[in-house]
Structure formats: C-alpha cells, structure tokens
Amino acid sequence: MTKPVSSGKLSPLASLIFFSRWLQLPLYLGLILAQCVYVFHFWVELIDLIGAAMGHEAALQHILDAVASGGIRPTKLTETTIMLVVLGLIDVVMISNLLIMVIIGGYETFVSRLGLDGHPDQPEWLSHVNASVLKVKLAMAIIGISSIHLLKTFINAANYDSKVVLAQTGIHVVFLLSALAIAHCDQIMTRTAQAGSKH
C-alpha cells in the first residue's frame, strides 16, 4: 500500500495548530528536572541508610524519622526498618521509570520523532510505542508503584489504622481493574483495526 502524498503546504491555521504541539516541550523539560530531584532524593536516602548501618547517629535518626510515618517511631535499625527504606528506594526507582516512559514515550508520540531507529541504546518498548501502548505501560507502572506502597503499609501495619490499610488495598484493586479495562479496550481497538485492514 502506497503512502498518501501531501497535497501541498498547510494552511496558516493548520500550521499553527500543528505547531502548537511544541507547547508541550516545557512540560517534558520540567519532568526531566523532576527526575533530577528524584535522583538527588535517592542518593540522600541511600547515603543515610549506609551511614546508619555504619553507626552514624545523625543518619540513623533521619532513617528512623523517615520510616515512622506518623506512628510508632523505631528506636534502632532493624531488618524491618532496612526493608522499609529499601522499598522506599525501589519506589523512587519505579517512579523514575514512570517519568522516563512519560518523557520519552510522550515526546515521541505527541511532539516529534527522536530519530532513535538503529541506535544501540534505544529502549525495546519505544520501537512500537503509540498512544495505546503508552497508556497500558503507564497503567502497569502505576500498579507497580501502588504495589510497593501497599507492601510498605503491610510491613509497617502496626503504625496504620485499619481503615487506612483497607483504603490503600481498595485503591490498589481499582488500579488493577483500570489497567485491565485499558488493556481490554486496547485489544478491542487492535482487533477492529486488523479487521478493517483486511477489507
């Protein structure tokens, strides 16, 4: 099937509307700055965790304050405390992954091509990214982040009211159902497109 040939220049209004996609560029640059903040936060927490394990009192106090979550404050570095801090670090990494997907996938889908075809470091998922694929991947990333938060809550359940635990569980279930609904809709759209291309 041959690609349709452009009939000529765009009208001024069409050019303006098409050019307006570049208004999203500052948003993606802002997300890159947010990514820098997450990287800084990750290293602060990691350095404090290492310092606490080596016996530095200030780092230990910071770690214990961080895992208290408004409830019972631990008095020493325990396996549970370390696990909560590590889960917090994993949470930062997963949110960072989500940011990367939004920045790269969103820019590639809605603003302009990055020209990464054939690049050795091109992400595997970017080779077939579109709005539908991006939605599903973002939904799965959000479920992963929600799972980490829920696991942290279960590990530290003594510091939470039962209503909070039930609410977080309910929100996680809603995320799961939403992701299933998005994936199902995407599957229906794909089948419809394939059926239409055969006719």
Image: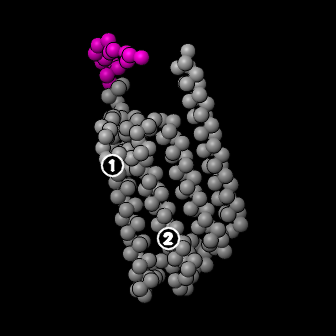
**Residue position for label 1:** 121
Left or right placement of residue 6 versus residue 158 in this view: left
Amino acid type indicated by mark 1: Asp
The numbered mark at residue 86 is 2
Could you tell me if the residues under marks 1 and 2 are in contact, i.e. CB atoms within 8 Å? Answer: no
In which image quadrant can residue 79 be found?
A: bottom right
Q: Is residue 84 positioned above or below 191 on the image? A: below
Numbered range of the magenta stretch: 1-16
| Viewer-closest of 127 and 108 | 127
Tell me, what colour scheme is on the image?
one colour
For mark 1, give the secondary structure: loop
| Percent of width and height locating residue 122 | 35, 45
For mark 2, give the secondary structure: helix
Instruction: Check the picture and name the quadrant holding the N terminus.
Output: top left
- Residue at 30%, 44% in the rendered image: 119
Q: Main secondary structure of the magenta part?
A: loop
In which image quadrant can residue 21 be found?
A: top left
Choose mark 1 or mark 2, whichever is in front. 1
- Residue at 66%, 46% in the rendered image: 177
Left or right placement of residue 157 versus residue 99 in this view: right
- Residue at 56%, 62% in the rendered image: 148
